[in-house]
Image: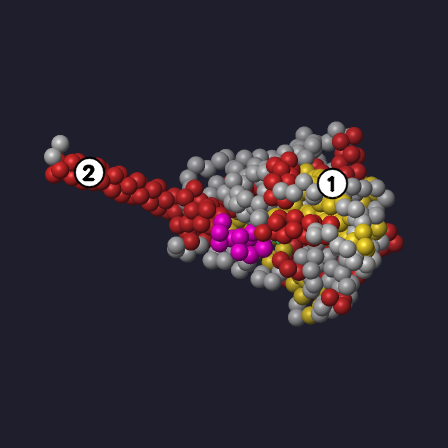
Amino acid sequence: MTESGSKLRIFKILKIIISSLLITVLLLFTIAAIRTLSLDVNAGLQLAHWEKTNNKSLVIDHHQREELLANFKEAIRIPTVSFSNTESNTTALLEFDRFLRKAFPTVFSSSLVHHELVGNYSHLFWVKGSQPELVPYMLLAHIDVVPASESDGWEAPPFSAKEIDGFIYGRGTIDDKNSLMGILQALEYLLLKGYAPRRGFYIGLGHDEEINGLNGAMNIVRVLKQRGVQLLFVMDEGLTISDGIIPGLEGPAALIGLSEKGQAAVKLSVSVAPGHASMPPRETSIGILATAVKRLEDNPMPRLFGYGPEGDTFEHLAHKFSFPLKFIMSNLWLFSPLLSRILERKPVSNAFVRTTTAVTFFNAGVKINVIPSLAEAYVNLRIHSAQSVEEVLDIIKDTVGDQRVKVELVDGFDPLPISGADEKAFGFQIIKKTVLDLFPTVTVAPGICIGNTDSRHFVDLTKNIYRFSPAWFKPGDPERFHGINERISTKNYEEMIVFYFNLIQNCDIRKLPEPHSSVHEL
Ligand SMILES: CCCCCCCC/C=C\CCCCCCCC(=O)N[C@@H](Cc1ccc(O)cc1)C(=O)O
Ligand SMILES: [Zn+2]
Ligand SMILES: [Zn+2]
């Protein structure tokens, strides 16, 4: 072949490659554009076609408002603290029991309600339905709270329930006495109005959620299992209504947790021969362990954004973002690597991207002039839905890469199964409808709960566990969770009562409206 012939051939091949590339890019962008325009949230929920079961309405008058707020404040003032795995304030738990009976006399005296204590301080209520063939559901909340000390910078003492500018301050106001009191106050009002449910339901109030629920939730599950109970769905604390928290999202979003991350507690330890501080070895047990910890912090777990329910969250919310974010969110199949890198910059959103690694204990040393024989650290990992305890443990061993560091799994469980969120998922659709009835401007989307809840103990009783409470979180609020200045507005607490009041009645529908094939709400 002549020189000009071979040049012509190269030119032709280049032309084919460039035009194929252009066609591919065009095709990808067409698919991306179609997805951007077609994805809409709230699809499938035909509010107009629902059987009407919310016959009782709740309009809170001045007297009721004073009374419900007084009840809530009294609940906050009882310091039901779980201090550690072995230490709880049992005096406060007993006081809380007495308080509940006083605050909700109708709940405790109604012939429709059966109440029992479980594990000494937890409460199990069974509210009898008039149609026993309808499968019951269960609402969960917990009584205990994490410790709080005013000196950490609280604007009001953490067990004062002080009201400042329309907010009640105190430990438990968002975790989780708002749900607990909201549920019981709603039931009290329903019973006072002569409501008798068609579908029976349980209410479970654990007393040790903050220390794993071993005596509370786990015993409630044991009791229900012994009675052969199966549940239609369970709803517990978890995600909330976020307003202004997700960057670029226009308007508030209610995320309903379909699952929760797994967890592993891993112990790292280094043992060496002890010795005199005047003749130190080149590396001490503390130095070796510190290097291992640094390696773990410098090498975060792999990005897995899009491989769990968090991908669905953003696809559902996509149409509420402005361009170009709308385009990016609608096409995670193309852009999830880019989005992961943006989300991982902040601790809250990083938790949705990967398994997180938190070093929570570091113990070593006995005396200033002794080379310590033992150094220990504990790492708390929150496992992404696409990983398992075993995989995470292998990655830790690889990352540490030092045989002198012993890596042991102390405790752990895999990420929880993912509950349904389609048009046939009763619990999801009931929660979604109840949110939209009360807050029509909110976008409802499935989510993943980054912390753990008592509901994880209920997996043998139902496949449908949802983690959601209608508390409004604005910028700065996620940090109040287990932090300082935990608070809720009086307006939001009232909304929570109305939410549970409506939810209980919505659960009385016999079946969901027929699935709707269109992608747009009519
Ligand atoms: C990009 C989207 C952003 C969406 C905004 C989400 C805001 C998240 C805000 C708060 C976190 C939600 C936490 C859910 C409830 C967690 C309850 C809890 O703290 N549970 C304990 C349970 C536990 C586990 C292990 C123990 O040894 C003791 C207790 C927990 O630590 O997970
Ligand atoms: Zn909680
Ligand atoms: Zn908590």
The image quadrant of residue 197 is: top right
Mark identifier at residue 410 = 1
Type of amino acid under label 1: Val
Judge whether 463 appears above or below 502 on screen: above
Type of amino acid under label 2: Ile
Residue shown at the point (65%, 43%) measured from the top left: 402
The x, y position of residue 289, in whole percent, is: 69, 49
Helix, strand or loop for disc 1: strand
**Where does label 2 land, which residue?**
10
Residue shown at the point (78%, 30%) measured from the top left: 227
Asked if residue 192 shows in the view, the reply is: no
* Range drawn in magenta: 340-351
Mark identifier at residue 509 = none
Magenta part mainly helix, strand or loop?
A: helix
Helix, strand or loop for disc 2: helix
The x, y position of residue 244, in whole percent, is: 53, 60
Q: Is 445 left, or right, of 22 in this rendering?
A: right
